[in-house]
Amino acid sequence: MKTTETPAPVPAESGAPVLKADTPPGGPRKGKKEGTTLNVFSHGILVIWAFMVAMPLVWAVMTSFKDDASIFGSPWSLPDKLNFDNWSRAWSQAHMSDYFLNTVLVVGGSLVGTLVLGSMAAYVLARFDFPGNRFIYYLFIGGMSFPIMLALVPLFYVVDNMGLLNTIHGLILVYIAYSLPFTVFFLTAFFRTLPTSVAEAAFVDGASHTRTFFQVMLPMAKPGLISVGIFNFLGQWNQYMLPTVLNTDPDKHVLTQGLVQLAVSQGYKGDWSGLFAGLVMAMLPVLAAYIIFQRQVVQGLTAGALK
Amino acid sequence: MQHGKYRFIVGFLAVPLGLYALFVVWPFIQSIYYSFTDWTGLSPDFKMVGFDNYSRMLDDDIFWKSLQHSVMFALLVPFVTLGLALFFAFMINVGGRRRKGGPAITGVRGSGFYKIVYFFPQVLSIAIVALLFAFAYNPDSGAINSLLRGVGLDGIQPLWLGDPNLALWCVMAVLVWSTVGFFVVLFSAGMASIPAELYEAALLDGASRFTTFFKVTLPLLWDTVQSGWVYMGILALGAESFAVVQIMTTGPGGPDYSTTVMVLYVYQKAFRDGQAAYATTIGVALLIVTLAFAAVVMRLGRRERLEY
């Protein structure tokens, strides 16, 4: 008896949700069927787009391990063996290591500078009333909507006259200047949301404005600084137009420039595999960082655009 | 809070504002001034020439081509990008099958995965993306044509970037490819803040997903869509289109100037042809186009703001 009784509840239990799902939630059956086709169709499109995004990247990684002959012969085949010498060639002979170092220096310097100077300006603009406050604020955020290329023509000569052309520190200063509009815009809004009482208490306790800012307000603004920091990091790491104009010395090239340069010169030398290795080398650290810090990256990049 | 306030304000603003004025504001003002001169950029001597550069520009066929292409970039790229992104975001967040017992509104299965993958291109430099696609478009050994051969479409082997009629579309497609993901994530965040009751009410009234999208989601998301449009348009007129056109197309500027855009033309005139003053003139035209674009989108898009 027991053996015949025990299986009975099992199908009943697993069948219950199916039965429920089969009952239309109040509409006719036809609507349900339509919904299913639509589901398959729309899900299909989502899958196709995911493929279209991922395939070029997968293709690049595959190609970076092949030798030149199979790159041209059969672009979609898997590499028959992993040619790591593509990578070492790109790293040393094609100067990818130098481009990496230059980029790290430029981005490191400008990121710190942007955050320090941007938060100082934003704090003053958000918290202090003084004549010209609004004017300076709009002067800063106006920079977000103007075409940078217009300024780059005279800027080239401004930078040249200061002796900063083709220097790492010159590039850092320019990066900072062009990152300020968004940084000030974002952080001004952020400082406004912080409670005033804490700063006032610190001030009453005898802390100077400067000390209040660095010891009380900046730590409180950490979430905002992280968001805007990620935004600026990616923007500066991926920057192409500014260095193309202001940094024409091949020894000082940053990663994006170096790769484009490499593409041009490898076109003559025919070292495509080395070039692909370089491309993947430049892509992987950012992609890896994105996958690890995914939530923060998405927040940082979309924070400014929402409201 | 008065004590030492102004000294503090000046101390904190001086460096950022000075840097910004020197490297951003001052060059902008200068370039408008230079557009009325005959400055070459190579020598420090120049004189005022009034509107000569502007009348030259109006007779310049390449300028008109670049203007036409830039306007296409500013209108088509955001339109396609935002359209796709809205569709994907809706499917990911709202388009899921209604499961009994679960919430009335769900995303499709694997929505988190899609959001992660779609966002990939956003973290890559547009220069790297452009290089990658320049190879993918290669007619002989590129990924796209060999994929077409692989599935038996040997007859269809376009020259892509080498074909003057196709090159511009190829370049625009790359911009769409690289930015859709950003807007999917942006719109997803917007959709998440729409109260579920609104969807439930629409469902109770028997609204299809199509109707729900156009009558509930889109109106409530309109502000985000609009600012996204302006943001994307400015990018497509400026830095992004510079990178893709300069890197991907021959010349650069494409076969028979078929892909040249204003921002690239400014660059070439200033730093290749030694005509800095004329370059700034085209730059001023680009500024006007950019501001006009932003004004038109904001104006056309103005709707009653919906509170929820």
Image (cartoon, rainbow, N blue to C red):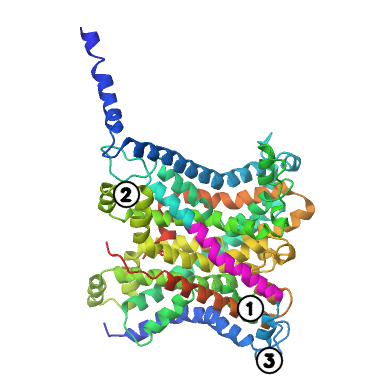
- How far from the left and from the top, in percent, is residue B63? 67, 75
Q: Which mark is residue B282?
A: 1
Label 1 Cα crowd, 10 Å radius (few <14 / some 14-19 / many 20+): many
Q: Report the front residue among A193 and A221.
A: A193
Which of the chains bears the disc numbered 3? B
- How far from the left and from the top, in percent, is residue A257? 65, 62
Which badge, 3 or 2, comes first in the chain's sequence?
A: 3
Kindly report which numbered mark, 2 or 1, lies closer to the viewer in this rendering: 2
Q: Which mark is residue B49?
A: 3
Find out whether the residues at labels 3 and 2 contact each other: C-beta distance under 8 Å: no
Where disc 1 sits, the SS reads helix
Which of the chains bears the disc numbered 1? B
Quick check: do tags 2 and 1 share a chain?
yes
Where disc 3 sits, the SS reads loop
Tell me how far mark 2 sits from mark 1, CA to CA.
50 Å
Could you tell me which quadrant the N terminus of chain A lies in? Answer: top left
Q: Report the front residue among A204 and A76.
A: A76
Q: Which mark is residue B207?
A: 2
Q: Is residue B67 magenta?
A: yes
Q: Quadrant of residue A154?
A: bottom right
Find out whether the residues at labels 2 and 1 contact each other: C-beta distance under 8 Å: no
Whether B284 is drawn above or below B263: the answer is below
* Residue at the image point whose x is 70% and y is 48% from the top: A274
Tell me how far mark 3 sits from mark 1, CA to CA.
16 Å
Kindly report which numbered mark, 3 or 2, lies closer to the viewer in this rendering: 2
Q: Amino acid at mark 3?
A: Val
Which of the chains bears the disc numbered 2? B
- How far from the left and from the top, in percent, is residue B72? 58, 66
Q: Amino acid at mark 1?
A: Ile
In the image, the segment drawn in magenta is B61-82
Q: Report the front residue among B122 and A21.
A: A21
Drawn side of residue A220 relative to residue A179, left or right: left
